[in-house]
Image (spheres, rainbow, N blue to C red):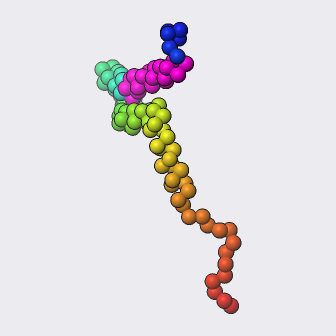
Amino acid sequence: MRKFMSVSTFKLHKTALVTLVLQCFIPFSCVGIPLIIIFTVILNNYVEYQELATDTMILISTHSMVSTIVMIASNSHFMEKVREILRFFKTSTPKINSIVERTIQI
């Protein structure tokens, strides 16, 4: 496949494949695995693992947040905008001098 592509196209292709694999893995890990645990606990009547099955709902609820983070992290344009926003907040905070002046005269 590399023979038919330029270096920049191959780099973009590789980035797209990594992004695709991550975006396919997220639903499986955030939804599929917890559902397998829940159904296993219910069908086999594992009472001692009910808390684990209940706690996996937290993992299911993180699906959209994790998908969004991966989408932002894998897209260079989004990542650059996030860096700009973080730089803005970092530089806009007022700086406090280490020298304290006396305000009350004794």
Residue 6 in the image, given as x and y percentages of width and height? 52, 16
Question: Splitting the image into 4 quarters, where does residue 71 fall?
Answer: top left
Q: Which residues are magenta?
A: 7-30
Q: Is residue 1 above or below residue 27?
A: above
Is residue 72 rendered magenta in the image? no
The answer to which of 10 and 52 lies nearer the viewer is 10
Is residue 9 rendered magenta in the image? yes
Residue 90 in the image, given as x and y percentages of width and height? 55, 54
Asked whether, in this view, residue 93 is left or right of residue 52, the answer is right
Asked whether, in this view, residue 101 is left or right of residue 71, the answer is right
* Residue beneath the point at 39% across and 22% down: 24
Q: How many marks can you see?
A: 0
Residue 37 visible in the snapshot: no
The secondary structure making up most of the magenta span is helix
- The residue positioned farthest toward the left in the image shown: 43
* Residue beneath the point at 41% across and 26% down: 23
Q: Is residue 5 above or below residue 84?
A: above
